[in-house]
Image (spheres, rainbow, N blue to C red):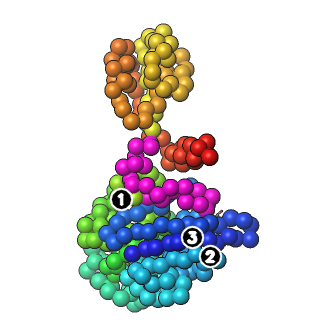
């Protein structure tokens, strides 16, 4: 459904995207992960036919994104990273304007989405918060029942409850066989929805992986507070990976099996324990460093 081959766009400042390639099959939810400035939006803009590739090509539904722009875009719901609204309009005015340009617009679907996302569409856009504007954009993207969704950071500005509502909406559309490309810098969001994900950094694809493989790369970090400070030294002697210690607190990092973790810790009195997921940025760095070391 979506095909990108050796796509390259170097800006005059040397930034851009370089030899980006990946394919997305029908019915697949594909995550596009990377830190700020990695090249996600630039890649997506090529898919929407807003930029002519310097090298390589992008196609959607079998049509070249640049040469056959209108055909390529026909069955696509696109949510840009930043939507250009006309501030004098209300949310509903904007949705009506968009509906006028969409094939397959469904009024009932629009109203159901407004109800789901819980906002007042009569509010003037200039009075809307970032999250509320994002909701208007989501309705505009989903209300014409597209086959392919191309979403640039769809949950930015949404509160956690609304992020969950959005994830459920994606899963519902996925069940109908829809195809998604979704950029994000949130691993949690990608994890809940995606089958596969590409990781991009400095304009280059680092890896394209099945989501379960990506999950196994994510390390868990535990801060354990021990009743007896002298137990810290004993744990350091074990085979657990200790990242740091501070008086009676010890930081243990786990990747994969928990057996040794529970075995060892059952020997001590623990007064507090907190767990944190490794951030996406750290996963990139680990992956990137491992690749570099292997060279
Ligand atoms: N028109 C342009 N001229 C020069 N540099 C640009 C242009 N557009 C993007 N860039 C640069 O290219 C790089 C990739 O930008 P891009 O917007 O694609 O990143 P992104 O992954 O979408 O990031 P974000 O999460 O911040 O939206 C950045 O360093 C950006 O500053």
Q: At 64% from the left edge and 77% from the top edge, which residue is drawn? A: 54
Q: At 41% from the left edge and 85% from the top edge, which residue is drawn? A: 74
As drawn, the label of residue 195 is: 1
Q: Quadrant of residue 231?
A: top left
Q: Quadrant of residue 260?
A: top left
Q: Earlier in the sequence, mark 1 or mark 3?
A: 3
Q: CA distance from mark 3 to mark 2?
A: 7 Å
182 or 97, nearer to the observer: 182
From where the camera sits, is residue 68 visible? yes
101 or 207, nearer to the observer: 207
**What percent of the width, then of the height, locates residue 159?**
41, 56
**What percent of the width, then of the height, locates residue 36?**
58, 58
As drawn, the label of residue 6 is: 3
Q: Is mark 2 within 8 Å of ligand 1?
A: no
Q: CA distance from mark 2 to mark 1?
A: 28 Å
178 or 123, nearer to the observer: 178
Give the secondary structure at mark 2.
Answer: strand
Q: Is mark 1 within 8 Å of ligand 1?
A: no
Q: Is mark 3 within 8 Å of ligand 1?
A: no
| Mark nearer the viewer, 2 or 1 | 2
As drawn, the label of residue 71 is: none
> What residue would you read off at disc 2?
55
Q: At 58% from the left edge and 64% from the top edge, which residue is drawn? A: 39
Give the secondary structure at mark 3.
Answer: strand
Is the residue under label 2 in contact with that under label 3 (CB below 8 Å)? yes
The question of residue 146 being in magenta is answered with no
């Amino acid at each position: 459904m979506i095909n990108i081959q050796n796509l390259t766009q170097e800006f005059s400042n040397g930034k851009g995207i370089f030899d980006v390639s990946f394919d997305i099959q029908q019915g697949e939810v594909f995550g596009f992960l990377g830190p700020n400035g990695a090249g996600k939006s630039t890649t997506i803009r090529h898919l929407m036919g807003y930029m002519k590739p310097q090298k390589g090509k992008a196609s959607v539904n079998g049509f070249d994104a640049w040469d056959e722009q209108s055909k390529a875009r026909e069955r696509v719901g696109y949510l840009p990273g930043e939507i250009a609204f006309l501030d004098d309009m209300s949310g509903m005015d904007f949705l009506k304007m968009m509906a006028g340009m969409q094939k397959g617009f469904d009024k009932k679907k629009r109203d159901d989405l407004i109800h789901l996302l819980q906002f007042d569409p009569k509010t003037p856009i200039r009075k809307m918060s970032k999250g509320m504007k994002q909701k208007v954009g989501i309705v505009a993207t989903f209300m014409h029942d597209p086959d392919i969704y191309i979403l640039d950071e769809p949950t930015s500005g949404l509160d956690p409850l609304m992020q969950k509502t959005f994830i459920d909406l994606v899963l519902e559309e996925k069940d109908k066989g829809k195809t998604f490309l979704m950029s994000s810098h949130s691993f949690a969001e990608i994890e809940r929805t995606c089958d596969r994900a590409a990781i991009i950094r400095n304009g280059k694809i680092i890896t394209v992986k099945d989501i379960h493989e990506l999950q196994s790369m994510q390390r868990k970090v535990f801060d354990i507070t021990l009743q007896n400070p002298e137990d810290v030294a004993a744990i350091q002697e074990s085979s657990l990976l200790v990242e740091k210690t501070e008086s009676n607190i010890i930081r243990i990092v786990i990747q994969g099996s928990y057996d040794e973790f529970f075995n060892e810790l059952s020997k001590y009195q623990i007064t507090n324990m907190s767990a944190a997921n490794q951030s996406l940025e750290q996963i990139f760095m680990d992956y990137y460093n491992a690749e570099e070391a292997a060279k």
